[in-house]
Image (cartoon, rainbow, N blue to C red):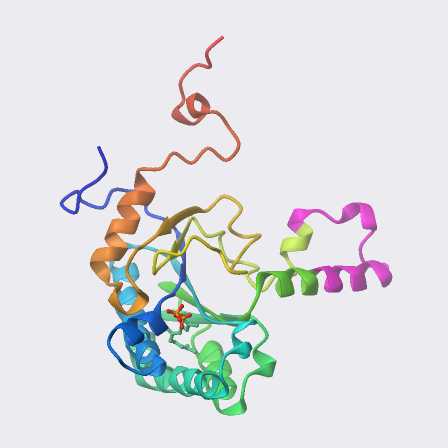
Amino acid sequence: MPPSEDTPVARPLPRHVGIIMDGNGRWAAARGLPRLEGHRRGAERLFEIVDACIDLGVGTLTVFAFSAENWKRPQDEVSGLFKLGEWLLRAHLARLHRRKVRLRVIGDVNSLPDFARAPLIEAVAASAAHEAFTLVVALNYGARQEAAQAARLLAEDVAAGRVRPEEVDWARFETKLDTHGLPDPDLIIRTSGEFRLSNFLLLQSAYAEIHIAKEYWPDFGREQLETAFRDYCGRERRFGMTGSQVQGAPPAS
Ligand code: FPP
């Protein structure tokens, strides 16, 4: 029987949750509002979800705030998103410190406009010692771009004689990814009913469970997060093994 809304959230919860916050535009369109209003409402949701993750005991949350492909959007939407990001940080910085949240950014932040990049870099540095929770914001991020950069960095090591080609394995490759030092995501949530990963944490999500929520991101709150966790807790994670191995039962002959 599928879990109902009354079923308590079971354990173990995901250590690291990734969220593709999709549907802001459609949420706004359905109400005859400008797309940026959808993003604004979505931005407000973000901190409700951060609080819920902290309260429930999740250690790391990575949110896809701006993809490397999002530059193709209309110019006013792109600049509106960065203004919103800057406002969001200013409005919630004290709260992040209070809750001992370490802020981290993945993606090519060097190409962000100065007014958005500078306070972000400052906030990342100022929160580096916090250990209660890690909020990772993917900004100008694309998994393929991240993999290409990791390959480039490793190739430089090989060319300089620091690494032999036969020493290149996943463990070494992983050290060159933006996410180095973070646990792999256990659960990826995508809102708005779309079944796509859209260049988000593709390598890190090799064994992640995926939950698709039908709600648009501005309608995704604590209740929907708990539904996603119940779904996650009902999955059997086998990591390439058999079901009986995972359950500790003797293998069938
Ligand atoms: C996807 O919805 C959402 C985004 C591209 C932006 C997500 C950003 C926030 C929630 C606000 C925080 C912003 C920053 C920069 C920190 P969509 O616009 O693709 O929705 P649609 O598919 O319905 O059009």
Give the image location of residue 50, x and y in percent. Answer: 31, 66
Residue in the picture at 41% in, 70% down: 102
Give the image location of residue 223, x and y in percent. Answer: 20, 57
Taking the image as shown, residue 207 lies to the left or right of residue 132, namely right
Q: Let me know if residue 36 is in the magenta part.
A: no
Of all residues, the one furthest to the top in this rendering is 253
Depth check: give the residue in front, 229 or 192.
192
Residue in the picture at 27% in, 63% down: 220
Q: Is residue 98 visible?
A: no
Image quarter for residue 236? Answer: top left
Q: Is residue 120 visible?
A: yes
Residue in the picture at 86% in, 61% down: 159
Q: Tell me which secondary structure the magenta stretch mostly adopts.
A: helix
For the N terminus, which image quadrant? top left
Q: Quadrant of ligand 1?
A: bottom left
Q: Let me know if residue 156 is in the magenta part.
A: yes
Query: Magenta part of the protein: which range?
Result: 151-171
Q: Is residue 167 above or below residue 94?
A: above
Taking the image as shown, residue 174 lies to the left or right of residue 66, namely right
Depth check: give the residue in front, 25 or 125.
25
Of all residues, the one furthest to the left in this rendering is 6
Taking the image as shown, residue 206 lies to the left or right of residue 90, namely right
Image quarter for residue 41? Answer: bottom left
Give the image location of residue 146, x and y in percent. Answer: 62, 64
Taking the image as shown, residue 33 lies to the left or right of residue 252, namely left
